[in-house]
């Protein structure tokens, strides 16, 4: 019996509606009401097994769901086309999710701990600041991703000689060293940072507002939002294809038991290096575009606390499931901005959210489903 498509489409529509509401409302009571509705829907989906039906529907229609998500994303951009702040939040969420996809490859697939995600964001961001006025913007993005991957390759050499929390300490040390280097390096602006040129494509300057007539003007964040969502969608498709391929199977084997994988001829070290470099490349790509969106970079933007934000997104969304990263990013990025009184306590809020998720939903908001052999019922 064919699986209907409407459960997956309904889940996408509900998610888009909650995202739009969270971006549009400003009063604290309204924000809390949106969060309460989202939590209630999550509980209902778990109790009625509606979430499982939506996941099965999405798996049965792998081409329809991405189209629906892309349509909802474009609809959200059009809805917010004149709201600068909401579009900036949408760009930030999309790019933080893109960076979290890189950590997702490392944590969820290869089992490599990385607590320096913000440092690799910084590599991409400073690449955009230094090269933005000398190279085409697309090439700047590619260069930022490449330099972040190269930095990850150099860090992978000592990383493979350690295990567990010792490996995590190496990444933490790298993040602290990079921030210190940026602060004392006057060539890169020192503590004051650097300005970043905007993105241009074929003569179109993304920093210019879109003016149709005297009464109609769209925010200059509209093309940035479209580009960020397009990059996020393309990267998500790539990550899902990797997961379902023999590459994802090899990464799963290395994560679960590297010794057993080696007995079957799987080179665990090589696969960990590959996952670490590709994941850091995604962080560098997100950092380069995020720097162009904000127009400025400085060392405090890439502190250890910002790395914890990315880790929180991965844990809250569900380690190993890229579908949970976007709703988790909305909670982690948008919620402190909407509840300004919580800004100074945002890390306390993240800690409470992580504890609640680990207590109530150990697998995250959207846990990863077990890998199934094709053809099995």
Image: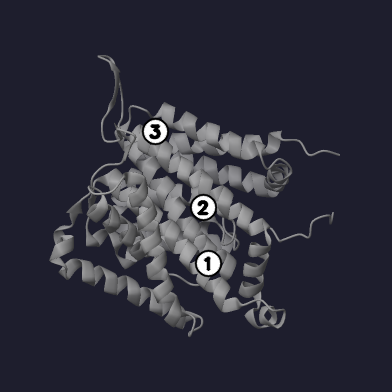
The residue lying at 42 percent from left, 64 percent from top is: 149
Q: Which label sits on residue 164?
A: none
Question: Could you classify mark 2 by the number of other residues whose Cα lies within 10 Å: few (under 14), some (14-19), or many (20 or more)?
Answer: many
The residue lying at 57 percent from left, 54 percent from top is: 239
**Badge 1 element:** helix
**Residue 132: image location, x then y, percent:** 26, 49
Looking at the rendered image, the quarter that the C terminus falls into is bottom right
- Residue at the extreme bottom: 161
The residue lying at 40 percent from left, 41 percent from top is: 90
Tell us which disc is closer to us: 3 or 2.
Answer: 2
Residue 190 relative to residue 304: left or right: left
Tell us which disc is closer to us: 3 or 1.
Answer: 1
Q: Considering only vertical position in the picture, is 182 above or below 212?
A: below
**Badge 2 element:** helix
Circle 2 sits on which residue? 325
**Residue 162: image location, x then y, percent:** 48, 84
Q: Which label sits on residue 275?
A: 1
**Residue 199: image location, x then y, percent:** 30, 41
Q: CA distance from mark 3 to mark 2?
A: 21 Å
Residue 349: tell me if it is visible: yes
Looking at the rendered image, the quarter that the N terminus falls into is top right
Q: Earlier in the sequence, mark 3 or mark 2?
A: 3
Q: CA distance from mark 2 to mark 1?
A: 18 Å
Q: CA distance from mark 3 to mark 1?
A: 37 Å
Tell us which disc is closer to us: 2 or 1.
Answer: 1
State the image quarter where residue 259 is shown.
bottom right
- Residue at the extreme top: 214
């Amino acid at each position: 019996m064919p699986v209907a498509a409407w459960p997956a489409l309904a889940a996408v529509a509900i998610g888009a509606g909650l995202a739009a509401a969270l971006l549009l409302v400003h009063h604290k009571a309204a924000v809390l009401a949106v969060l309460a509705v989202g939590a209630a829907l999550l509980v209902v989906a778990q109790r009625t097994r509606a979430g499982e039906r939506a996941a099965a529907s999405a798996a049965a229609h792998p081409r329809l769901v991405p189209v629906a998500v892309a349509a909802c994303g474009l609809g959200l951009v059009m809805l917010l086309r004149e709201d600068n702040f909401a579009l900036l939040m949408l760009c930030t969420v999309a790019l933080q999710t893109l960076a979290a996809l890189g950590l997702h490859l490392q944590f969820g697939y290869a089992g490599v701990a990385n607590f320096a995600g913000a440092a690799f964001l910084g590599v991409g961001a400073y690449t955009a600041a230094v090269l933005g006025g000398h190279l085409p913007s697309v090439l700047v993005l590619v260069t930022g991703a490449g330099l972040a991957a190269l930095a990850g390759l150099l860090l992978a050499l000592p990383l493979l000689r350690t295990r567990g929390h010792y490996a995590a300490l190496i990444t933490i040390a790298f993040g602290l060293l990079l921030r210190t280097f940026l602060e004392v390096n006057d060539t890169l602006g020192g503590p004051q940072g650097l300005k970043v040129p905007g993105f241009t494509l074929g003569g179109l300057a993304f920093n210019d507002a879109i003016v149709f007539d005297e009464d109609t003007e769209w925010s200059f964040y509209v093309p940035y939002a479209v580009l960020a969502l397009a990059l996020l969608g393309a990267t998500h498709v790539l990550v899902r294809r990797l997961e379902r391929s023999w590459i994802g199977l090899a990464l799963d084997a290395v994560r679960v038991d590297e010794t057993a994988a080696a007995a079957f001829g799987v080179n665990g070290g090589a696969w960990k290096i590959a996952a670490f470099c590709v994941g850091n490349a995604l962080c560098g790509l997100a950092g380069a575009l995020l720097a162009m969106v904000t127009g400025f970079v400085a060392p405090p933007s890439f502190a250890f606390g910002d790395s914890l934000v990315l880790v929180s997104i991965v844990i809250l969304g569900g380690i190993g499931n890229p579908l949970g990263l976007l709703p988790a990013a909305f909670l982690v990025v948008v919620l402190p901005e909407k509840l300004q009184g919580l800004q100074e306590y945002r890390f306390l809020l993240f800690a409470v959210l992580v504890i609640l998720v680990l207590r109530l939903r150990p697998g995250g908001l959207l846990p990863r489903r077990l890998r199934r052999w094709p053809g099995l019922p």
